[in-house]
Image (cartoon, rainbow, N blue to C red):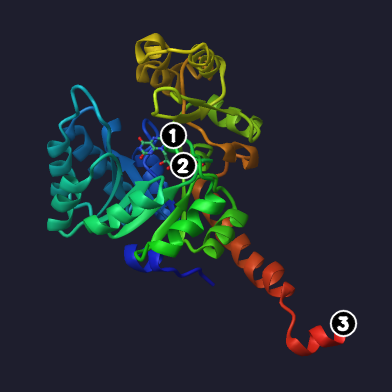
Amino acid sequence: MAIRTRFTEMFGVEHPIAQGGMQWVGRAELVAAVANAGALGFITALTQPTPEDLAKEIARTKEMTDKPFGVNLTILPAITPPPYAEYRAAIIESGVKIVETAGYKPQEHVDHFKAHGIKVIHKCTAVRHALSAERMGVDAISIDGFECAGHPGEDDIPGLILIPAAADKVKIPMLASGGFGDARGLVAALALGADGINMGTRFCATKEAPIHENFKQQMVANDERATDLIFRTLHNTARVAKNAISQQVVAIERAGGAKFEDVRELVTGARGREALQGSGDTDAGIWSAGMIQGLIHDIPSCHELIDRIVSEAEDLIRGRLNGMLVSGAARVAAE
Ligand SMILES: Cc1cc2nc3c(=O)[nH]c(=O)nc-3n(C[C@H](O)[C@H](O)[C@H](O)COP(=O)(O)O)c2cc1C
């Protein structure tokens, strides 16, 4: 048995599960493992220091899998933006057929990718943004509820409302994202109107995730309360794992009147990256993680994780949900 949805059909993957772009984590090892397990993984373009490095990372992934995979391009407002056009060219020239865009004003990127026959999934955190991406011509939407790791936006709408609200209006295939990690989440997402799920944090706690073991163990140890929302006062909210640094940032923001300069040293990407890939000190910097940590109890391989989610989802649908249905005659007899 398999679960077939508009997402599996459109992207030619076996299971309705994606591994979204993740800074420092979305590398060849993880993406290929996700692809080989029948789901859709994304290399994170900006984790690679240059467009040439991205091309090499795509080639490395192709050596490890012959299944479909994609590249995430996260568009952030920056004083000196990365050379987006060159990253885009690297993606197109490498023959990648699926791109996940995230962030601000993706139009020029979407147009360029579409002109080269690339399918685009746009990530967003609000129904109005999903509709505007749909108008821009993207092929699918990935919508993140307030539970998610990274940037949940400023509306604070959890998935239980956001996903059906989006499903009511968005016509193209849609992935539910934020707070998913097991079969119950997948079945719920499908019931809410999504065509599959996107997971970030849960994939960080897998054997193949290229991060220090301490972070994986910390995610297993953490419960659902172990996140902080930083940059709230700067209107650029990010959900990160609660640790010594995130608590300092929150305290500075709560004191009032904080500017980015006041927290810059604490939140530098270099601190987080060095800890994730080097020292393994989970209190050394900021790292993204979501509320789903409360439902993470082990560190499986991607294959084990994806197989488990899909087979338990099938059991849930066939067993628990189907078992609750009572036919007309049986209902009368029971009454
Ligand atoms: C470590 C980490 C880094 C992330 N970096 C990015 C990124 O660079 N670009 C992006 O679009 N999303 C990023 N995300 C968000 C994920 O793609 C995904 O939308 C999110 O994790 C879903 O919520 P979940 O963690 O509850 O599954 C990141 C998430 C994590 C956990």
**Image check: 129 left or right of 53?**
right
Residue 39 drawn above or below residue 221: below
* Image location of residue 273, percent across then percent down: 39, 22
Respond yes or no on whether mark 1 lies under 8 Å from ligand 1: yes
Q: Which mark is residue 228?
A: none
Q: Which residue is mark 1?
A: 150
The mark closer to the camera, 1 or 3, is: 3
Query: Label 2 amino acid?
Result: Gly
Q: Is mark 2 within 8 Å of ligand 1?
A: yes
Q: Indicate the quadrant of ligand 1 in the picture.
A: top left
Q: Pointer 2 and pointer 1: residues touching (CB < 8 Å)?
A: yes
Q: Foreground residue, 144 or 36?
A: 144
Q: Which numbered disc flags the more N-terminal residue, 2 or 1?
A: 1
Q: Residue at x 60, y 62 (%)?
A: 313
Residue farthest toward the bottom in the current orientation of the protein? 329
Q: CA distance from mark 1 to mark 3?
A: 50 Å
Q: How many marks?
A: 3
Q: Residue at x 18, y 46 (%)?
A: 109
